[in-house]
Amino acid sequence: DQQVKQNSPSLSVQEGRISILNCDYTNSMFDYFLWYKKYPAEGPTFLISISSIKDKNEDGRFTVFLNKSAKHLSLHIVPSQPGDSAVYFCAASAAYSGGGADGLTFGKGTHLIIQP
Amino acid sequence: EPEVTQTPSHQVTQMGQEVILRCVPISNHLYFYWYRQILGQKVEFLVSFYNNEISEKSEIFDDQFSVERPDGSNFTLKIRSTKLEDSAMYFCASSGATSTDTQYFGPGTRLTVL
């Protein structure tokens, strides 16, 4: 049962352009969403998060948008740089409503390739 | 910048043997987690630990697995009798003072069961 879905296994974007990575979820209990970036042979690195009371959160070149009614979130990277080439994971939890140390539910990841 | 560390980076073991994977969480963090990623699959939650006890565990975390915080700095995952399907990357993570704080991940231990 895929509660968090990233339907694009890979995405190729030209340097300087906008990268948009998408994520859908099915569990309506999820109220906290995160994006992680992962290079080969390293652990996931936290990028940005958003709670369900917001619909947008911005941090430098990274912006996350949340559409609760559609159970959809997206990560925008502007402008895209070569160092952004990595696998991006969407993750979710019921952190605010769960009351405990909730584990994250991850999507399968999208491999972003930034072309020069 | 504080980071989560894990040892060893790669562990090779024979099926049926016990392994202990070690993690040093970020020093002022209170919540600790183990995840695994089988090759080609997604990262999966195993267990969370808070206040010296398991807070939550997934269906993957069966009786073969156990976790411990033996001292003030280490957090360990023990697999009692390894199986071939336990081969995976195992990631430790920690988060701060509340359960909604961001989870920071270590570099992982690659476990190979032969």
Image (cartoon, grey):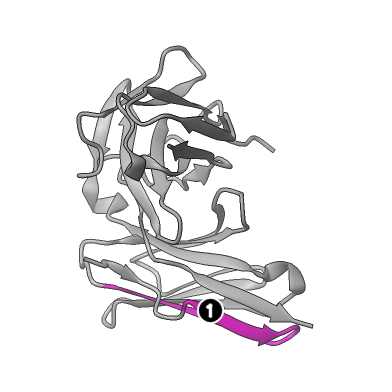
Q: Residues within 10 Å of mark 1 (few under 14, many from 20)?
A: some
Q: Position of residue A49 (x, y in %)?
A: 47, 61
Residue A19 within the magenta-colored segment of the rendering: yes
Q: Residue at x 40, y 46 (%)?
A: B36
Would residue A9 be seen by someone viewing this image from the given angle? yes
The residue segment tinted magenta is A9-25
Q: Residue at x 31, y 50 (%)?
A: A95
Q: Position of residue B93 (x, y in %)?
A: 47, 39
Q: Residue at x 45, y 55 (%)?
A: B39
**Depicted B7 relative to depicted A62: above or below:** above
**Depicted B83 relative to depicted A85: above or below:** above
Secondary structure of residue under mark 1: strand
Q: Quadrant of residue A100?
A: top left
Kindly identify which residue carries mark 1: A10
Q: Nearer the viewer, residue B107 or A28?
A: B107
Q: Chain of mark 1?
A: A
Q: Looking at this rendering, what residue extends furthest in the top direction?
A: B71
**Depicted B48 relative to depicted B19: above or below:** below
Residue A102 within the magenta-colored segment of the rendering: no
Q: Amino acid at mark 1?
A: Ser
Q: Position of residue A68 (x, y in %)?
A: 30, 76
Main SS class of the magenta portion in the image: strand
